[in-house]
Structure formats: C-alpha cells, structure tokens
Image (cartoon, helix red, strand yellow):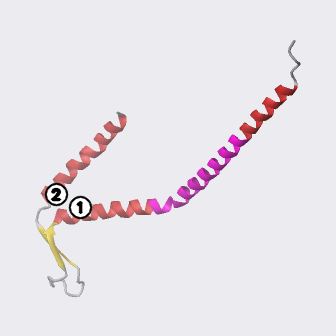
Amino acid sequence: MTKKIINLIILLPLGILLVVLSVANRQSVTMALNPFRPEDQVLGITAPFFVFLFVALIAGLLIGSCATWLSQGRYRKRARNEAKVAIKLQGEAETHKKRAEQLAAQATGYGQLPAK
C-alpha cells in the first residue's frame, strides 16, 4: 500500500509536468543532422518540440538502465556461482544425513538385548 502511495506522490506530479510541457511546446522544430548544411532537409527531422523531449527522456532512461545492468554484472555472476555451490552443498548434506540415519539405525540394532 505504501508503495502505491509513494508511486502516486512521485508519478502523478511527473505526469502532470510532462503534459504541461507537451502542451507548452507544440510548435514544430527542425532538427538538422547535417552540421555543414543545416538548411538541408534531407538530413533533417521536423516534429513538435515535445517529441524531441520525450525521445531524449526515453533515450536517457534506456542508457541509464543499460549502464546499471552492465555495472551490476559481477554481482549477478557471483549470485549464480553461490547458488551452484549452495545446491552442491545441500546435496552433500542430504547424503550425509542419510548416512547418519543409517549408522544410527545400525547402532540401535546392535545395542539391544534379546527380548524374553
């Protein structure tokens, strides 16, 4: 429940801000991809300004998430290795437990006196 409230507190103002920003920046803008001849329309993109803002926001989110994922790779590798070791040790513990139960059963069988 608190997670929903926190998301509402953060995402609602952010959504309102993005809508206001979009409405305020509706004019068409040309982004020139040719630095030597900016008036060349072949390498230019014309769109409302808020489209460029959203594309920049999405690109920033994707680049940031990729950088985070790549920087945390060593931790994921360590977790995989430790999970393999844990499974191996759990298997060994099971075999030792079975062996201990067998030895305990044998020990109780030898120490008993014959019944009258």
User: Cα distance, mark 1 to mark 2?
Assistant: 9 Å
Q: Is residue 71 left or right of residue 100?
A: left
Task: Spot the residue most to the left.
Answer: 27
Give the residues in magenta: 69-95
**Is the N terminus in the top left, top right, bottom left or bottom right quadrant?**
top left
Q: Is residue 114 above or below residue 21?
A: above
Q: Quadrant of residue 23?
A: bottom left
Residue found at x 66% / y 45%: 91
Q: Quadrant of residue 99?
A: top right
Give the structural element (helix, strand or loop) at label 2: helix
How crowded pointer 2 is (Cα within 10 Å; few <14, some 14-19, many 20+) is rated as some
Judging by the rendered image, the residue that carries numbered circle 1 is 54
Foreground residue among 87 and 65: 87
Residue found at x 24% / y 44%: 12
Q: Is residue 115 above or below residue 63?
A: above
- Measured as percent of width and height from the top left, residue 71 is found at 49, 61
Judging by the rendered image, the residue that carries numbered circle 2 is 22
Q: Is residue 83 magenta?
A: yes
Q: Is residue 35 magenta?
A: no
Q: Is residue 100 left or right of residue 23?
A: right
Residue 45: numbered disc: none
